[in-house]
Image (cartoon, coloured by chain):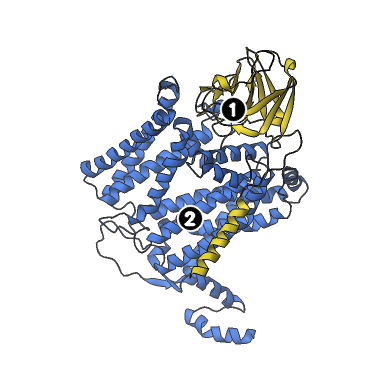
Amino acid sequence: MNKAVSKREEPIAKERGYSHGPGRGVFDNLILHIHPRTVPEQTLKFTLTWGLGGMAVLLVLLQITTGLLLMLVYEPSPSKAYESILILQNDVVFGQYIRNIHYWSANLLVIVVFLHLLRVYFTGAFYRPRRFNWILGSCLLFFVLASNFTGYLLPWDQLAFWAITICTGMFEYIPGLGMWLQKAIRGGTEVGSSTLLIFFTIHTSIIPFCLILFMAFHFWHVRRAGGVVIPKRRDEEQEIEPNYVDTIPNLVFRELAVALVLIAFISVFSIFFDVSLADHANPGMSPNPTKAPWYFAGIQEMLLHIHPLFAVFIIPAAVLLGLMILPYLPYQTHAAGIWFVSRAGRKTAILGAVVALVLTPTLIILDEFVVHINAGSSGISPAVSHGLLPTFLLLGAVIIFYLLVRKRFSATRNESVQAVFVMLMVAFVLMTLTCALFRGEGMKLMWPW
Amino acid sequence: MGLGVLALAEFIGVIIAFFWPRKPKTAEGGFGDIIVAGQVDAFPLNTVTAFPMGHFYLCRLEDGGFLALSRKCTHLGCTVPWMEEDRKFVCPCHSSAFDMRGNVINTPAPRALDLYVISIENNMVKVNTGQRIKRTEFRAEQVTYPKDV
């Protein structure tokens, strides 16, 4: 049987011009089910993709392997969860180390996936025929965040318990369905044993299943589009005929190199930085300050300034919707493969970033120390004074900025939308950093050192 | 086709049923049950007493009336401690503050602390922690008075 297989494959191997031992053919075959036989040489350049998609895949695999190990020790009930983490850390050989790898690579995964989104956007890899794959990628981002979020509760320490309490508390402000959703996700009115079991199940079975399913779908769409976007120079009008080279070894060896560097980095990092474990969860005492996991800190920062209905529902929903329709807007030019659309696009993108860099901290500080509208006494509903009004002001600012870029810089729609995208992304990152690093006791602004 | 839709609806129905919040089992005298707080006279005027097992604070107002306030901040559900020296509830999560009647004195909390229903029988104060009442602000009719006052 084995002989027959290798005989059948020999001619292909010879054709490719390198020899291999038994078993190698099977492995090559596996790779060639994911990758095509040949790829355009220009797409191999590291600074096109930065290897981010591949890194995300590797991190997911790392999550699955370390997660499986952790499941052998972890017990998902409030009376045992915390104990089992202590046992893992103190009594299991390499227990703390495996937990470190799981934790750090999970956090790195959020960053890598976010950077991957930025890379895809800024190289214009979301135009036709890759439009639908942008949606699939957004779903994968959602699953990665959901996976991190559900995993956050599992240690059942004070940090986990209260972060999940306030994050699931945000559901309350979704009109109509909110209360039901909150009860469904908590399995009751408060975070308790049902919550832990639901989160454990979502974390260890539902999300891994969805993640793998959507990853396959995502990769298939990459192949259907003819691989990753082919880079173009800004001044090139003509599409150059791509020069195809063998995937093995050209692409695969590059991927392996990135994978090994990343594994080495995480392994070493996890030796030196232990994941902490706070005190056992205590529903009677909220720690001060209580913060959401860092990837939701941007929303928490918004919550400090804007009425919850707008901060946790209307604004995120609008931004998410905007993200989804991004590839489907009527663009004037097809700028796939060009970084930042054009030279003018790079200029307006920098402008967007600068505006956000100046405005975000200014507004945060103004709201913190200067403007103080007292609810109740002014007679206007807080949903209007703290919600509708600031939301409209912000929306107005975004629209004015968009029109300004279009008129003043005579920018195309591609470039103007990109400038707004950059502005919002920078603002979101700044809010995340503010809440995660610059807020201390009582959520007051302070230096992180 | 119709059968397929029916099967799909059933499938989704089962999923929702599994996520549907079940009635929590309440231990007798624990949270979710009617809790006997104590004799009326055990609570001096103008004081706040915490009932950690019942997840509420029993407030005796200056005029002798009782209020049972939920300890959950109305903003995002953190537990608010009573600050005796400042005579207010201050949420550690986003620094919302509430007065003794549960009224918001510092945002971002959008409404006053929730109430539990109080009944006073034979001079004993009982709090029904299975029934939480949402309100926007304090009103006089929310206070329960002992019969002989």
Few, some or many residues within 10 Å of mark 1 (<14, 14–19, 20+): many
Question: Above or below — where is A410 with respect to B119?
Answer: below
For the point 37% across and 37% down, the residue is A356
For the point 40% across and 45% down, the residue is A319
Same chain, labels 2 and 1 = no
Label 2 residue SS? helix
Q: Position of residue B82 (x, y in %)?
A: 64, 21
Question: Nearest the camera: A113 or A132?
Answer: A132
| Chain B tint as drawn | yellow
Question: Nearest the camera: A53 or B110?
Answer: B110
* Chain ID for blue: A
Q: CA distance from mark 2 to mark 1?
A: 34 Å
Figure quadrant of the C terminus of chain B: top right
Of all chains, the one bearing label 2 is: A
Taking A309 as reference, is A108 left or right?
right
| Count of numbered labels shown in the rendering | 2
Question: Nearest the camera: B94 or A51?
Answer: B94
Q: Which residue is mark 1?
A: B92
| Amino acid at pointer 2 | Cys
Label 1 residue SS? loop
